[in-house]
Amino acid sequence: MTKTAGLRGAGLVLLAGLACVGRSPTPPSVETAAPGDAATTAPSPVPGAAMSPAPDTANERDGVPPRGDGLASAAEPPRWPAPGAPLLVPEVRFPPGFRTRRVYLDAGHGAEGNTGTRSATCEDEELFTLRAAEDLARRLEATGHFAVRISRKQGARVPYAARLAEAEAWGADVLVSLHSDSRGAAHPWSPSPGQECFRQDTTPGFSVLWSTSASPTLQSSRALLARALARGMSRAGFPHYDGVDYTGLYAADTEQAGVFVSREPSHRQIFVLRKPTIPSVIIETHHALDVEESARWREARTLESFAAAVTQGLVESFTVPKE
């Protein structure tokens, strides 16, 4: 989670959970601190398969009150994250000779004293990121082109320094950290009797973060990876976040919508972005305080679309000439 300002009240290393933005009532992010139920899944994306819609049904959203926007007209489909807003499963193409790549998936947060933000349904971020990392790892490995290692297991409290050391010792090609974001001025609400957490339904969407704290060569590799992943998610139908709450924390990438850059010393310094000696990024998968978007990320079809988007993004990052 990269907690955004204004909240009141890697082989391939995919790290989930450190980067949520700004000031919030949730625990501090591990990236700036010191030490330290698996989801229902759908079939893995098949290389070369045609892009197909992943429709959504309202009964998967039972118990989640509608936000009241995104209603479809006869000519216009509903917009994400409204019920029925479609996602695609992008075609994944592996070029001839594409060798097996090592991906280190870090389920963000889950370090001692750091559970991440709490979603609009009162779920700790560390639970979401582990669920998402486990699903993505399974789908990546099913392609036969990726070896994947996840940074932690259920119940384990793993310091971030230990995660990076493991990724680099394993020989990971890249590090990708999975998170959910916390943005804007939220208000308390009760999703069910006896529970109270925060909600803010106006800024859905994903973001991908990278840091300039590195050599020019590593900077280029980080930027290439971040932009490829963002393109993949956009193709699948995930909208990008516009960054309105990132002012002073990150700068918008000049080449790809949905990508944001941490430029030191003026911007936020995040451990998993600046410390790895391999290409590393954080994917803020969605806005966890948005009730509808949080619910959509519990759906198997959302995870399927996400996995296909990430898979294609990884392939492109390894095959496009470095900048």
Image (cartoon, rainbow, N blue to C red):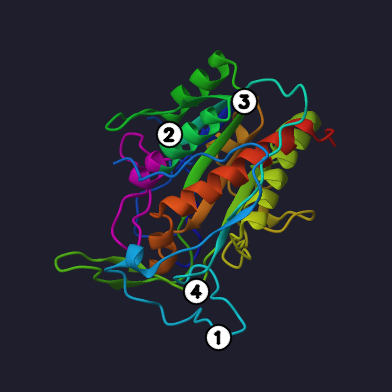
Image quadrant containing the C terminus: top right
Foreground: 79 or 18?
79
Q: Amino acid at mark 2?
A: Ala
Residue 13 higher or lower than 284, as above or below:
above
Q: Tell me which label, 2 or 4, sits earlier in the chain.
A: 2
Question: Which residue is the site of mark 2?
Answer: 34
Q: Amino acid at mark 4?
A: Thr
Question: Which residue is the site of mark 4?
Answer: 202
Q: Tell me which label, 2 or 1, sits earlier in the chain.
A: 2
Query: Would you call the spot at circle 1 few (<14 residues within 10 Å), some (14-19), or many (20 or more)?
Result: few
* Distance CA(mark 1)–CA(mark 4): 21 Å
From the top left corner, tell me how far across and down residue 251 is, in percent.
Answer: 69, 56
* Distance CA(mark 2)–CA(mark 1): 50 Å
In the rendered structure, find residue 145 and report the number of the disc placed on it: 3
From the top left corner, tell me how far across and down residue 296 is, in percent.
Answer: 43, 60
Residue 255 higher or lower than 7, as above or below:
above
On the rendered structure, is 255 left or right of 175?
Answer: right
Q: Amino acid at mark 1?
A: Ser
* Distance CA(mark 2)–CA(mark 3): 35 Å
From the top left corner, tell me how far across and down residue 313 is, in percent.
Answer: 67, 41
* Distance CA(mark 2)–CA(mark 4): 32 Å
Q: Amino acid at mark 3?
A: His
Q: Tell me which label, 4 or 3, sits earlier in the chain.
A: 3
User: In the image, which residues are magenta?
Assistant: 108-131
In the rendered structure, find residue 73 and report the number of the disc placed on it: 1
Closer to the eye: label 2 or 4:
4
Q: Secondary structure at mark 1?
A: loop
Closer to the eye: label 1 or 4:
1
Residue 1 in view: no
